[in-house]
Image: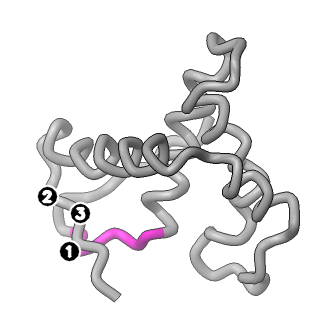
Amino acid sequence: MAIISMKSSTPSVSKATLVILVIALVVQFKGSVAQNTCPTQLGNLNVCAPYVVPGTANTIPSSDCCGALQAVEHECLCNTLRVASRLPSSCNLPPLNCGN
């Protein structure tokens, strides 16, 4: 599993980095979940990883990625983003600033 580190001098973190962090967290929990729950739904978003990595040339998601995203319940995705946005403060890092 990839480990994402954030330096305290980093003023902002891109949305793509947040998505990768969420996917990494989900993969960690996916193995213990047998039913179609939030972690399973988010784990299926791995097919979207090539489209959200900073610097990627291909930014148009595949139909597999779009299908996986459509299968994630709204509340699941929103709650995951809320939890992920709290992680930096839990790790004594500066808060995320995902300005465009």
Marks 2 and 3 sit apart, C-alpha to C-alpha, by 7 Å
Percent position (x, y) of residue 68?
75, 52
Instruction: Say what secondary structure mark 2 lies in.
Output: loop
**Camera-side residue of 66 and 97:** 66
- Residue under the image location 86 percent in, 58 percent down: 64
Residue beneath label 1, please?
Answer: 11
Instruction: Tell me which amino acid carries mark 1.
Output: Pro
**Camera-side residue of 19 and 10:** 19
- Residue under the image location 68 percent in, 16 percent down: 31
Q: Is residue 55 above or below residue 81?
A: below
The reply to whether dot 2 and dot 3 touch (C-beta < 8 Å) is no
Q: Which mark is residue 96?
A: 3
**Residue closest to the far right:** 63
- Residue under the image location 62 percent in, 34 percent down: 1
Q: Residues within 10 Å of mark 3 (few under 14, many from 20)?
A: many
The reply to whether dot 1 and dot 2 touch (C-beta < 8 Å) is yes
Magenta segment, principal secondary structure? loop
Residue 13 sits inside the magenta stretch:
yes
**Camera-side residue of 48 and 34:** 34
Instruction: Tell me which amino acid carries mark 2.
Output: Pro
Percent position (x, y) of residue 57?
75, 86
Residue beneath label 2, please?
Answer: 94
Instruction: Say what secondary structure mark 1 lies in.
Output: loop
Q: Is residue 77 left or right of residue 34?
A: left
Instruction: Tell me which amino acid carries mark 3.
Output: Leu
